[in-house]
Amino acid sequence: MSADNTSPTRLLVTGAGGQLGRAVMALAPGARGLSHTDLDITDPEGVRKVVGEGDVLINCAAYTAVDRAETEEAAAFAINATGPGVLARVCAEAGARLVHVSTDYVFPGTASQPYEPDDPTGPSTVYGRSKLAGEQAVLEFAPDAHIVRTAWVYTGTGADFVATMRRLERERDTITVVNDQIGSPTYAPDLAAGLLELAAKPAAPRILHATNAGQASWFDLAQAVFTGLGADPARVRPCGTEDFPRPAPRPAYSVLSGNSWAAAGLSPLRHWKLALNDALIAISDYPGPP
Ligand SMILES: NC(=O)c1ccc[n+]([C@@H]2O[C@H](COP(=O)([O-])OP(=O)(O)OC[C@H]3O[C@@H](n4cnc5c(N)ncnc54)[C@H](OP(=O)(O)O)[C@@H]3O)[C@@H](O)[C@H]2O)c1
């Protein structure tokens, strides 16, 4: 990637120690990755020290504890709203370009067809409101910035949903999973590749959606994990949202449309089932397809 023919664009990644940040760094080893301990995105002086003219900064830093945010509003807004605002101001001052990651939670989650970028927002959680405030700050302060909304991000490791289903498959005979929340499961490395492609496309629209294609309920995703592991998917039983009450209400339907992404000339992300299969293969103890 090059801003012109003489000076190569430098890529910076904030939140580089998180799930998505690590996936971006894995695909862009020449980038400068800044974890939370390296750089606090709410610290303007710290941000000024690292951002230079012509840089592209991919912001993967966020407060992502959706339920805890209901009682930690100030912390959620500091990281998800103030922080992106700081990044946007500094990038605009320095002549750098910001690619900021946002979420399906900015929408009400009550649709019946995939959300387009210009559909009305209306978050119903503190997390969603804080992320929407971050989007607004980015749009206000950085004229060249991009906002990429994504959803249901996983790698299959750590404590994400896919990793949890793998663990429960080993530990339990049957499990019960919510079947009335529909979204777009997204493999972090696929999203990371998309962000890197966007980083080299400054003319793309300011707000974009990027998820793996297709849609699923959590139950569908859990069954697909079991199937991929060679386990009987009938061991996964469906239940309703009311069976798993959470502090932050979950969207019933928050599929994000990939139309804007494809129209911008960006490579569509593959179907979530193909991505899940690769995710399971990438995990070392996976024995291979049944
Ligand atoms: N995961 C999903 O399902 C999902 C869905 C939709 C959208 N998104 C969005 O995708 C992006 C990446 O999420 P993720 O899944 O990679 O989350 P993650 O694993 O929680 O990573 C977020 C990273 O941000 C860091 N961070 C927190 N506060 C910071 C600060 N003030 N300054 C610098 N770094 C800070 C965290 O470090 P510490 O842990 O050390 O605090 C963590 O490493 C976020 O914008 C998120 O809103 C995620």
Image (spheres, rainbow, N blue to C red):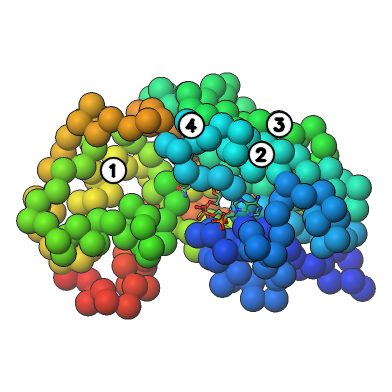
Number of numbered markers: 4
Q: Is residue 10 above or below residue 235?
A: below
The amino acid at mark 2 is Ala
Q: Crowding at label 1, few (<14), some or many (≥20) Cα neighbours within 10 Å? A: many
The amino acid at mark 1 is Trp
Residue displayed at 62% across by 28% down:
118
Quadrant position of residue 216: top left
Label 1: state its secondary structure: helix
Q: Is residue 38 above or below residue 112?
A: below
Q: Crowding at label 2, few (<14), some or many (≥20) Cα neighbours within 10 Å? A: some
The amino acid at mark 3 is Gln
Residue displayed at 38% across by 63% down:
158
Between the C-alphas of marks 4 and 3, the distance is 23 Å
Could you say which disc has been placed on residue 58 in the image? none
Between the C-alphas of marks 1 and 2, the distance is 30 Å
Residue identifier under label 4? 71
On screen, residue 105 versus residue 75, left or right, reads left
Between the C-alphas of marks 1 and 3, the distance is 30 Å
Quadrant position of residue 176: top left
Label 3: state its secondary structure: helix
Labels 1 and 3: the sequence-earlier one: 3
Residue identifier under label 3? 136
Q: Position of residue 106 (x, y in %)?
A: 54, 31
Ligand 1 contact, mark 2 (Cβ < 8 Å): yes
Label 4: state its secondary structure: loop
Residue identifier under label 2? 78
Q: Can residue 158 be seen in the rendering of this structure? A: yes
Q: Position of residue 260 (x, y in %)?
A: 60, 40
Q: Is residue 60 above or below residue 252?
A: below
Q: Split into 4 quadrants, where in the image is the C terminus?
A: bottom left
Residue identifier under label 1? 218
